[in-house]
Image (cartoon, rainbow, N blue to C red):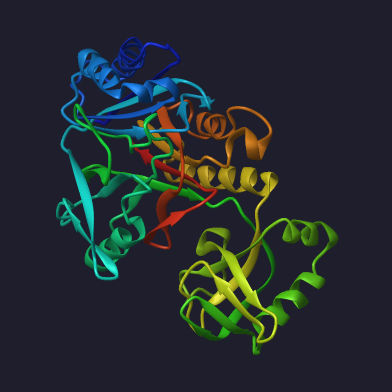
């Protein structure tokens, strides 16, 4: 039997009514199969009483498990609903597979945090993760997973809207939870990750020749800041203009490659520079010997990168549309970046042949680059489910 997925969105002001409408549309895509999992994203006034929303989902769908979160905007099939009241419901039936939902908490311990509630990922095919950004150390968890369960892809996004009283809004089953993270452990379920960091490479690849922590002291044998300026000065006029709007550094995640593509770089911001020493501070740990390349972000490069990334996944599917997909896109994308509505949702509909999709505008996106999962910004991360 194949995976069945359905999705629906509603802009009804009444939370229960809207949830029933969206969940009924999602149920129609399951072909009569029971829902093993429902994923719910809610925005606007629905967050004043999300319990009513969850009641509506259970009334219409009765899923075996449910997770979700508050959102600054939601995505549905070909649609993006930003900065307004809406609910998106995504439902899946996984015959032969399992979807175990869970809630995690984190308590400070020394300089780190003790995370409780994470199930063993032995045998897991993927993890879906929706953390509350104010109360959960997502980077710490991803480091634990990379060390203990390398190769298990993690996809998701940080909740991007609290309740009106400022509390976190995570959904687990029929409960609304204020802190921590909710997730789904998938086993026996094929998932094809797609991560588009939406940044254009600039200039040549460079080798870090001296570094410590997140500080790059030298690039290609020169003080890093001096080399960076030399690279920018040599760029064509259009690329120099992109660099002035916000320069980023791509760090190669597979140092052994002889030829690097866009997806081989983990893109991070440049967070500081010391004009006296020529050192650069990067938003990630770096090591001597790593290959880096400057990047810049704009709407055209983000559009092209997302289309290319989706095209590669469509090719991997052999031209067959997937059962469905979940999309976690940055709340800095949407109309703010592209100047038009429905950009990412439209690209998904085109590349995935109108497969059922849902998602939300996240405050940070989670997905794998080079086999390890990271927390990103300005990224579109998609979990694609083949039939």
Residue located at (37% from left, 48% from top): 134
Q: Position of residue 252 (x, y in %)?
A: 51, 70
Q: In terms of depth relative to the viewer, which is nearer, 166 or 66?
A: 166
Residue furthest toward the front? 165
Question: In the picture, residue 188 is in which quadrant?
Answer: top left
Q: Can residue 7 be spotted in the picture?
A: no
Q: Position of residue 9 (x, y in %)?
A: 42, 19
Tell me if 303 is positioned left or right of 148 in this view.
Answer: right
Residue located at (31% from left, 21% from top): 49
Residue located at (51% from left, 79% from top): 290
| Position above or below: 131 against 290 | above
Residue furthest toward the bottom? 221
Q: Position of residue 307 (x, y in %)?
A: 58, 42
On-image quarter of the N terminus? top left
On-image quarter of the C terminus? top left
Residue located at (21% from left, 24% from top): 35
Question: In the picture, residue 318 is in which quadrant?
Answer: top left
Q: Position of residue 244 (x, y in %)?
A: 75, 60
Tell me if 79 is positioned left or right of 299 in this view.
Answer: left
């Amino acid at each position: 039997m194949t995976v069945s997925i359905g999705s629906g969105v509603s802009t009804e002001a009444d939370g229960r009514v809207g949830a029933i409408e969206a969940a009924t549309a999602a149920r129609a895509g399951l072909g009569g199969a029971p829902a093993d999992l429902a994923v719910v994203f809610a925005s606007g006034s629905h967050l004043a009483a999300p319990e009513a929303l969850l009641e509506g989902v259970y009334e219409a769908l009765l899923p075996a498990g449910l997770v979700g979160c508050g959102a600054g905007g939601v995505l549905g099939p070909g649609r993006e609903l930003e900065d307004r009241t809406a609910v998106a419901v995504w439902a899946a039936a996984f015959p032969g597979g399992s979807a175990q939902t869970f809630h995690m908490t984190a308590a400070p311990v020394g300089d780190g945090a003790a995370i409780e509630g994470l199930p063993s990922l032995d045998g897991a095919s993927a993890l879906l993760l929706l953390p509350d950004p104010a109360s959960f150390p997502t980077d710490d968890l991803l480091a634990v997973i990379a060390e203990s369960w390398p190769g298990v892809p993690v996809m998701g996004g940080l909740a991007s809207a609290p309740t009106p009283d400022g509390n976190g809004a995570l959904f687990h089953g029929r409960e609304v939870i204020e802190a921590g993270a909710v997730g789904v452990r998938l086993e026996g379920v094929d998932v094809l990750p797609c991560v588009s960091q939406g940044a254009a490479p600039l200039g040549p690849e460079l080798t870090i020749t001296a570094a410590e922590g997140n500080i790059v002291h030298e690039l290609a044998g020169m003080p890093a800041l001096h080399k960076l300026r030399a690279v920018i000065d040599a760029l064509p006029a259009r690329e120099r203009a992109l660099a002035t709007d916000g320069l980023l550094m791509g760090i190669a995640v597979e140092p052994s490659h002889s030829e690097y593509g866009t997806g081989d770089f983990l893109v991070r911001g440049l967070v500081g520079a010391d004009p006296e020493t020529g050192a650069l501070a990067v938003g990630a740990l770096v090591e001597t010997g790593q290959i880096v390349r400057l990047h810049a972000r704009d709407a055209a490069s983000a559009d092209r990168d997302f289309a290319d990334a989706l095209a590669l996944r469509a090719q991997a599917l052999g031209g067959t549309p997937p059962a469905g997909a979940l999309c976690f896109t940055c709340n800095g994308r949407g109309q703010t970046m592209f100047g038009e509505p429905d950009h990412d949702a439209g690209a998904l509909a085109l590349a995935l042949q109108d497969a059922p999709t849902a998602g939300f505008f996240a405050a940070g996106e989670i997905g794998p680059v080079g086999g390890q999962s990271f927390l990103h910004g300005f990224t579109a991360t998609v979990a694609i489910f083949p039939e």
